[in-house]
Amino acid sequence: MQLDFQSDKPIFLQISEQIEDAIFTGAFPEDSQIPSTTELSARFNINPATVLKGMNKLADEGLIYKKRGLGMFVGRGAAQAVREKRQQDFYQQYIVSLLTEAGKLGLSKQELIALIERNYGGETNGDQK
């Protein structure tokens, strides 16, 4: 994990997003323990309350849970929940604006699909899969 202290994004959000990302990528599998508030606050030399605020956000979303006296653990289905959340965010942030702009340009559904397929999978030389 890395924190950007120069960013406008609050530190507690950076912490929650990075833990969420680690859950999504499998670095923290279901039922595994995540680093403690004390560990993270010491590692980054930040207030434990800031770390706790980030963890509480994840707990409120049901991604992590507390085992009294043991620490915080990744909830069952957390990776899938993150995937679904990110898919919805992707739709809202990119697809809606893509469709709006395509409408302004008068692109048909087929033309839009052709544009997407032209570079699908990161191909940059025009090859199609």
Image (tube, helix red, strand yellow):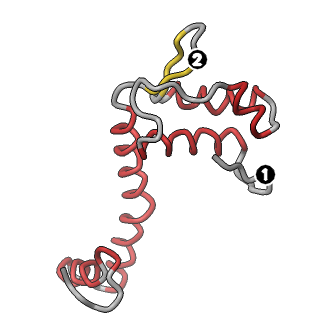
Find residue 71 and report its image quarter: top right
Q: Which residue is mark 1?
A: 5
Tag 1: amino acid? Phe
Provide residue 120's location: percent of width, then percent of height: 28, 76
Provide residue 122's location: percent of width, then percent of height: 35, 77
Q: Secondary structure at mark 2?
A: strand
Q: Say which residue appears at 53% left-offset and 31% top-offset.
A: 58
Please tell me which residue lies in front, 51 or 96. 51
Q: Which residue is mark 2?
A: 71
Provide residue 5's location: percent of width, then percent of height: 79, 51
Does residue 34 sit above or below 6 in this rendering? above
Looking at the image, is mark 1 or mark 2 nearer the viewer? 2
Measure how far apart labels 1 and 2 are at the Cα level: 26 Å
Figure quadrant of the C terminus: bottom left
**Left or right: 100, with 34 as reference point:** left
Dot 1: few (<14), some (14–19), or many (≥20) neighbours within 10 Å? Answer: few
Q: Which mark, residue 28?
A: none
Q: Say which residue appears at 69% left-offset and 38% top-offset.
A: 12
**Left or right: 33, with 75 as reference point:** right
Q: Say which residue appears at 36% left-offset and 65% top-offset.
A: 95
Name, please, the residue furthest toward the bottom. 125
Does residue 92 sit above or below 25 in this rendering? below
Tag 2: amino acid? Gly
Find residue 62 and report its image quarter: top left
